[in-house]
Amino acid sequence: MAASQEDELAILRAQRLQSMQEQLANQAQTQLAAEEHAQQQAAHAANLDGLLRKFLTPEARSRLARIAMVDPSRAQSIKENIVTLCQSGDLSAPVSDASLKSMLSQQSKSRSNASIRRI
C-alpha cells in the first residue's frame, strides 16, 4: 500500500513539474514577444523622428515636443500625418512653425465642430 502511494505521489510531482515547465515556457514566449514589439516600436519612433528632423524646422519640432508632453497620442498622429504628407509631396519640406500652427488649427476646428444637444 505504501508503494502505491509513493507511485501516485511521484506521478503527481511529475505532472506538477511538467505544468510548471509549460507555464515558464509560455511566460518566456510572452516576454520575448513583448520585447520584440517594444523594439519594433522604438525603431519606428526613431525612424519617424529622423524623418521629422528633415521635414520640420527646429521651431516646429519644439512645438511638436510641447504637444507631446500634453497629449502624446495626438502628437504621434500629427507626426505620422506630417511624414505621410511630406513623403507624398503634398507638403513642402521643411515645415515651418507657422504652417504647423495652421495645420493644428485646422485639426482642432474639425474636432470642435461637434454639436451639443440638450435633452
Image (tube, rainbow, N blue to C red):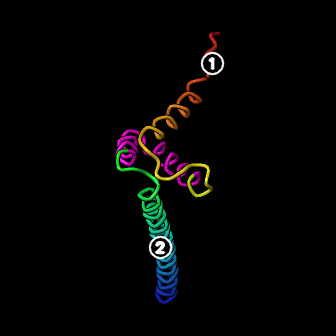
Instruction: Write down the residue under mark 1.
Output: 115
Relative to 44, does residue 79 appear above or below in the rendering?
Answer: above
Is 2 contained in the magenta span? no
Name the residue at 50% across, 31% down. Answer: 105
Q: Quadrant of residue 45?
A: bottom left
Query: What type is the residue that disc 1 sits on?
Result: Ser
Note whether 67 is above or below 19 in the view shown.
above
Q: Amino acid at mark 2?
A: Leu
Q: Total label count?
A: 2
Residue drawn at x 47%, y 55% is: 55
Q: As rendered, which of 70 and 89 lies closer to the eye?
A: 89
In this rendering, the label closer to the viewer, 1 or 2:
1
Q: Is residue 90 left or right of residue 52?
A: right
* x, y percent for residue 42: 43, 64
Residue 111 in the image: x percent, y percent?
57, 29
Q: Crowding near pointer 1: few (<14 within 10 Å), some, many (20+)?
A: few
Which residue lies at the image location 48% right of the left edge and 49% below the top edge?
76
* Magenta-highlighted residues: 60-85
The answer for how far apart the CA atoms under marks 1 and 2 are is 46 Å
Indicate which disc residue 103 carries: none
The mark nearer the N terminus, 1 or 2, is 2
